[in-house]
Image (cartoon, rainbow, N blue to C red):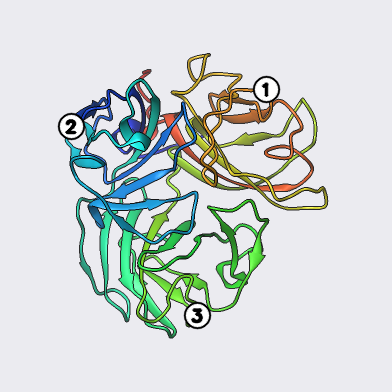
Amino acid sequence: MAYTTINKSTDHFNTVTYTGDGTNGQSITGVGFQPDLCWIKSRTAAQEHMWYDAVRGNDKLLRSNNTAAEATTSTSVYFNSFDSDGFTVGSETALGANGANFVGWNWKAGGSGSTNNDGSTASVVSANTTAGFSIVTHSGTGSATTIGHGLGASPKVIISKARNVLNSWFVQQPFIGGSWTSSNYLILNSTAAVATASTMINAVTNSTISFAGSNDWVNGNTYTYVHYCFAEKTGYSKFGTYAGNNSTDGTFVYTGFKPAWILAKAASGSQTPQNQSWVIWDNKRSSTGGFNENSYKLYPNATDAEATSGIAQVDILSNGFKFRNSTHQSNSTNTYFYMAFAEVPLVGSNNVPCTAR
């Protein structure tokens, strides 16, 4: 049974849905905290995935579906502000089009951040050590170096994006290949299977991230970067891989909690095609109230509107998730990478059952 020091997951991660009203200054509430990372996507239309965070600022936009450099956007028409119970958006079509439905995925870090000198190169860090999430920015050195991440625990997933140059979103983790030194990566804006490159992130500790060299993807000279770092917290977050079984009685993935949000990607294996979209399911975009079966999907690498067809169906269960078909996207005989965050932990701090919510 999973025990956690987090009794209320929605103090650290929460999903909200809303309908745009086409005006500047639409307040979106119900998050339950002031978010430091807001990832917003139109459900109704083919629009970009909009990423704003408190370290880069509420006028700095990145989009996970493409390689574009960071854009400076109007704080009245685009993303307005991070608020105490959510955020405020403007009339920009991808954030607040009148009558369109949207989803916002929200994480709490530690505000606008401060200088961190734990590594040989300074970074700016906004960290939530309780929930294992930090936002880190640094200026690339073009040579081997380390930067601090502020978590006090080793990250298990790091999503990196160059800010001032066209470049992909690199997702690194130690699960595929068995260690950070294997330098395996996936690309969030791509359908590509796992690949390997030298001079990427090659080690992490409880305080630092190590870059092996000059790779422009994560540490190029004159480039600036943002890194979203995730450490596992028992009963609240779980990251790893699972083996699909190509069956309607699909693979069950134990997380130790009822998931609120699941991200999955075909990474490697013998069954082709492996080049499949990333898929996100959550507990707010479901006709069944967040329980099985959920087939409401969005794709981080694509602008597509929300898909609600029967492919890539997943049961969201009290202690994990289980697939209900044999689609290549989530449950062929390939190996898949996943991330999951909790709606309700099984057991709270001090081994006391969590309050029912």
Q: Which residue sits at x=36%, y=74%?
A: 223
Circle 3 residues within 10 Å: few <14, some 14–19, many ≥20 = many
Circle 1 residues within 10 Å: few <14, some 14–19, many ≥20 = some
Query: Which label's residue is closer to the chain start, 2 or 3?
Result: 2
Residue 57 spot, x, y in % from top left: 22, 54
Residue with the most extreme bottom position: 143
Q: Nearer the viewer, residue 316 or 50?
A: 50
Q: Is residue 184 left or right of residue 327?
A: left
For the residue marked with disc 2, what is the amino acid?
Answer: Gly
What residue is pinned by disc 2? 25
Residue 343 spot, x, y in % from top left: 42, 28
How many numbered circles does the render carry?
3
Q: CA distance from mark 2 to mark 3?
A: 44 Å
Residue 63 spot, x, y in % from top left: 42, 50
Q: Which residue sits at x=27%, y=23%?
A: 21
> Quick one: SS at disc 1?
loop
Q: Quadrant of residue 348?
A: top left
**Can residue 353 be seen from the camera position used here?**
no
Query: Which label's residue is closer to the chain start, 3 or 1?
Result: 3
Q: Quadrant of residue 47?
A: top left
For the residue marked with disc 3, what is the amino acid?
Answer: Ala
> Quick one: SS at disc 2?
loop
Query: Is the residue 343 above or below the residue 299 in the image?
Result: above
What residue is pinned by disc 1? 310
**Pointer 2 with pointer 3, Cβ within 8 A:** no
Q: Quadrant of residue 97?
A: top left
What residue is pinned by disc 3? 212
Q: Is residue 164 left or right of residue 340?
A: left
For the residue marked with disc 1, what is the amino acid?
Answer: Gly
Query: Which label's residue is closer to the chain start, 2 or 1?
Result: 2
> Quick one: SS at disc 3?
loop
